[in-house]
Image (cartoon, rainbow, N blue to C red):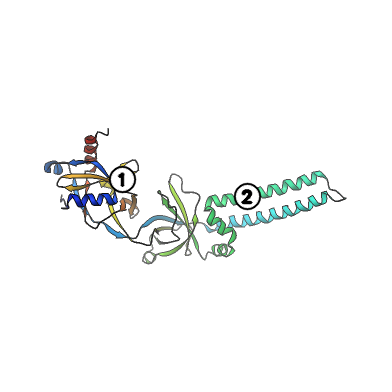
Amino acid sequence: MRVERARISVAAALALAAAAASAHAAMVTLSASDLLRRDVIVRDITPQRERPVRRAYGRAVRLGSIVAAVDAIRSARAAAKLDSILLTETQALSHAPYQISAQKLAQAQATASEASARLQSMVGVLRARYGRRFAAQLLNDSRLVARIGSAAVSVIDAILPYPLLRRPPRSATASIDGAPEIRAKPAALSFLGTGGRVPAGMVGQSLYYLGPPLQSGTMLRVRLRLDTRPARIVRIPVAALIFDGREAIAFREVAAHRFQSFRLSHARPYYRHGHLVGYQSAWSGDEPVPIAVAGAGLLWALLEHAVGKR
């Protein structure tokens, strides 16, 4: 098995460490024979300059359920308004010379209260499902509801795994699996709001986007651009990582047969063909970084033994 090694100075390696990750205090040193016998493989990983993105899987939701929910709320709102007017008139009549019975007044109050509670409940369900921002648009923007009802657009539910985005991007692009003509030209999406639920068993968030007309249930691959400025990142394969709680830890060779562990700061998973292949993190410098892509578990065990953690 071919072993690729980089000849970078210890000083350069430490400079990279200070900028992109916080290093552990201990070093791990192996002899040349141990390095080969224990299958510790080192490969140069070159930092790449890219625009920060997050990838998510999307699905075109059923438009009929959205329109039906909005229509039901509109009907409930009209009924609550009518009951409120009837209550006002009943209260006025109760003070007139021809007073109505207290029973009819109480009945009118109960009817108006029930209609108001039903309306608030339906609006709450809409907000819980589609988020406050998207729900407000559905209730206040009749043109948007008309476009959704006529199937001139589609609503895309993008499921984004943890970590959450505090400020989801206002625009995104999507491509459809099994459709080369669409994959060659991604469709533009515009942000509608953050949903109130995610699929069972998943930790993350649901983002709603407005997209081109698609059949309900169509699966998409959504690309979210997080920032307008390019950033330098390093991508490390899963096999090279040790997970200590939520921290992703890797080992780089800082001298011949000498390794230093470092933590990936704000590491994010990246996928290829739907499968998790590694984690990426912001980095400083353009020099290739020699990473132990195999044998990281052994190095971690030796490091833990050296510092007496367990």
Who's the residue at 50% across and 56% down the image? Answer: 193
Residue at 11 percent of width and 42 percent of height: 33
Name the residue furthest left: 33
Answer few, some or many: residues within 10 Å of disc 2's Cα (few below 14, many 20 plus, some between 14 and 19). some
Q: Amino acid at mark 2?
A: Gln
Instruction: Give above or below for 63 relative to 38.
Output: below
Front residue of 13 and 129: 13
33 to the left or right of 19: left
Q: Amino acid under label 1? A: Ala
The correct choice, above or below, for 79 with respect to 309 in the image is below
**Which type of secondary structure does the marked residue at label 1 adopt?**
strand
In the image, which disc is placed on residue 248?
1
- Nearer the observer, disc 2 or disc 1? 1
The local secondary structure at tag 2 comes to helix
Hey, which quadrant is residue 50 in on the image?
bottom left
The image shows residue 255 at horizontal and vertical percentages of: 16, 47
Lower sequence index among marks 2 and 1? 2
The disc placed on residue 120 is: 2
- Mark yes or no: residue 290 visible: no
